[in-house]
Amino acid sequence: MLPAPSQAAESEKTIPSVPELLAERFPALQPYPCFPVAGVRPRLSLVTDGVGPLSLFGGVGTSIILGTLLANRLNADLRIVTRLEPPDTAPVREVLLCNDIALDGALEVAMAPLDGSVDLPLADGEIFLTTSWWTTRASFGVVPPSRIVALVQEDERMFYPQGDERLRCTETLSHPCLTTVVNTEMLFRHLVSGREPLANLAQDGMWFEPAFPQRARPRAREGKRRFFFYARPHNHRNLFWRGIEALDAAAAEGLFSADDWEMVWIGRDAPEAVLSRGIVPRVMSPLAWGEYQDFIMSVDAGLVLMDTPHPSYPPLDLAAAGAAVLTNTHPGKQSLSHYSDNILVAEPTVEALVEGLSRLQALAEDEAERARRREADRIGRDWTEALEPVVSRLAARLGARA
């Protein structure tokens, strides 16, 4: 039996308060310290975890484009506020350059680390654009929710089992004074009419379809065609393990043979593997923005699994570049042909995916048909045009609240 602590030891022990326990458990949700400053231009602050070269795929790049166009419309400067890594302006400028977007005002950067060790200067009437439910929640303690625009690009409730994180996520997304912008109509419809609808979005939310500016495809190369597998074992919604099951079964049936195809897997910590019939994929780490765009232009066929109610960016990236791509179905996502007939879908069973991979190879090897489908697709290529309705509505709403 353990001896009882002495009274002296009891008196020296520090017992945390409930707010201290909550701050330790949920550091990313704590408001970041700020102080007011006067005499500065109007400013829009974009709050995100990071903007390093490998952080800019899809969602973060989209937030930079939206933030830039909204700042231009509001005649405001743009400030990038990061929470997990020091900000870097070079990747931000690369995103804008690659998408033919120019910032009219100044570009500022700041870091508001989770430990609260840095105070953030706050201008009068500053608008915040947040990029996740946790950056939104933290910003609630900085400015009124009516001055926050939340960019929603996932049903973030799906990241968690039932519990405290999911509860707080739902509370944040449901805030009645929050202005919410959703990436794709498909995700918006899910959020407003799915099994757990968010009433505030149905009343006051808005959505846009993303754009995928693409250069002309390079000349047909000599040699093997290229197959791309979006290999992210740490992102459960990307169904990595089901993907390699299906690829192995497809290889056993003679699909995507090593004589005719180069197979490339890209993703953080993707393992090396040998598939049936001796196929050894080339495994690559995530690429920087410009490198990724160049790689996409070289792909003939892709397998991109995403167990979510929205298309995700890689299938649209690939289809916009003229590649054939296979993805999986999900409740509310039974077809993506309204974007492009180069995007094929299959149920996420091994058998259905192997059948889909057979269709994918046939389409990928029919370059004339792929080109015809690309010419007829419904994928936007201009970000300014794609975001104009949302930017106009946001500017009118935020101007009225200023």
Image (spheres, rainbow, N blue to C red):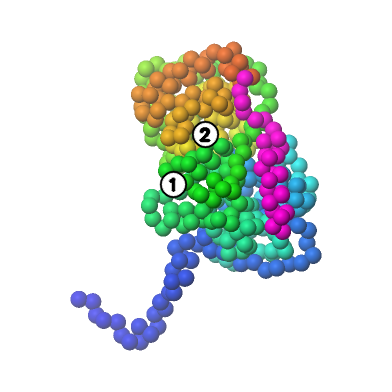
Q: Is residue 14 above or below residue 323?
A: below
- For the view shown, which residue lies furthest in the left direction? 1
Residue at 67 percent across and 68 percent down: it is 35
Residue at 59 percent across and 12 percent down: it is 368
- For the view shown, which residue lies furthest in the front direction? 203
Please check the rendered image and state whether residue 361 is part of the magenta-colored stretch, yes or no: no
Q: Nearer the viewer, residue 198 or 213?
A: 198
Which amino acid, by three-letter code, is at mark 1? Glu
From the top left corner, tell me how far across and down residue 324 is, in percent. Answer: 53, 22
Residue at 54 percent across and 51 percent down: it is 200
Please check the rendered image and state whether residue 380 is part of the magenta-colored stretch, yes or no: yes
From the top left corner, tell me how far across and down residue 380 is, in percent. Answer: 65, 30
Q: Nearer the viewer, residue 291 or 365?
A: 365
Which amino acid, by three-letter code, is at mark 2? Pro
Per the rendered image, the range of residues in magenta is 376-402
Considering the numbered disc 2 on the image, is that residue within a helix, a strand or a loop? loop
Considering the numbered disc 1 on the image, is that residue within a helix, a strand or a loop? loop
Q: Which mark is residue 196?
A: 1
**Comparing marks 2 and 1, which lies closer to the viewer?**
1
Q: Nearer the viewer, residue 363 or 257?
A: 363
Q: Which residue is mark 2?
A: 311
Residue at 52 percent across and 14 percent down: it is 365
Q: Is residue 137 above or below residue 237?
A: below
Q: Is residue 266 visible?
A: no
Q: Is residue 18 above or below residue 204?
A: below
From the top left corner, tell me how far across and down residue 231 is, in percent. Answer: 47, 35
- Report, in whole angstroms, how far the alpha carbon at label 2 lies from the one at label 1: 20 Å
